[in-house]
Image (cartoon, grey):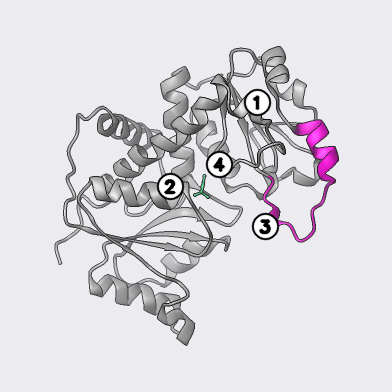
Amino acid sequence: MLNHLVDIKNLDKKQIIELVEMAKAFKNGNLQSSVQNKSMMTMFFENSTRTKCSFELAGKRLGLNILDFNVPQSSLSKGESLKDTLENLYFIGIDTIVIRTGENGFFKNILNKMSHPLIFINAGEGSKAHPTQALLDFMTMDEKIGELKDKKITIIGDIAHSRVAKSNIELLNKFEADVHLCSPDEFKDNNIENATHHSNLPEAIENADVVMMLRVQKERHESLGCDFKDYIEKYQLNSQTLERYAPKAILMHPGPVNREIEITSELLDGTKGKTILEQAKNGVYMRMAILNTLLKNVRGK
Ligand code: CP
């Protein structure tokens, strides 16, 4: 049974497939909520558009009571510890809390401290994990190209600072995809195994089934370790390059996109760019599936 959703590591293939099937059933209108009137709170310590809005809409569609924790106006600013805050929120009536944090290791630390069964959902954790993004990406790939075993999936950009890359790599390896990463040395993560590292973009995307572009995570760099002009020259993707080296590939990006840095506007606004908006749409259905699964066994308050 799934108690929290904080890392792809904690999910097995069967649980992932069940979440995807449930998300598809919600998308097709074939499934009703099992969790009406349970309570969800969003607590975002970092900015978000897609993740926060899609959790809120997913919760509304499931008939949840939804609250947003206003960080600057909360009693955290009066010195209350996060553990005390969270335990009070549980007793106020919150069943699940969707948290985005800049702190790597946040969920491991807080789960070790908690003595009440508040359900945690990781909505993005530093450069470490973004499991709900990886799940919605998996759903999108499954819809577009089917089974991922031996499919070539190339992830390009700031791998070292990207939580999306980490969670996707974890998930793709569970399904035996052929994972390729492409970045300049400054953005390479040498701790990542089970993936082929490249520094040359055409070589990395050659005959790929999926090309996933990433934003340079400027907010996580103490100083930008590379020259942007040089980065654009070597790692920006345009239609011509994609068509030449990976004509059958679907194009993905978790968003937000920095136009004309990692990807050109003509590529983003063309046919291939449409999958990126489908990812955002699938985010709502995947988050419905996650909430419906986690909250099913919550006791009434
Ligand atoms: N992909 C993603 O996490 O986007 P937001 O930062 O807008 O939530």
Instruction: Indicate yes or no: mark 4 CB to ligand 1 under 8 Å.
Output: yes
User: Which residue is the site of mark 3?
Assistant: 219
Helix, strand or loop at disc 1? Answer: helix
Say what amino acid the circle numbered 3 marks. Glu
Would residue 18 be found to the left or right of residue 240 on screen? Answer: left
Residue 226 counted in the magenta span: yes
In this figure, which residue is indicated by the disc labeled 2?
Answer: 10
Span highlighted in magenta in the image: 216-235
Q: CA distance from mark 3 to mark 1?
A: 26 Å
Indicate the amino acid at tag 1: Glu
Q: Amino acid at mark 2?
A: Asn
Mark 4 residue type: Gly
**Number of numbered discs overlaid on the protein picture:** 4
Tell me which label, 1 or 4, sits earlier in the chain. 4
Report the front residue among 149 and 96. 96
Q: Is residue 184 rendered to the left or right of residue 161?
A: right
| Residue 150 picture location, percent across and down | 56, 19
User: Of marks 3 and 2, which one's residue comes earlier in the chain?
Assistant: 2
Q: Which mark is residue 255?
A: 4
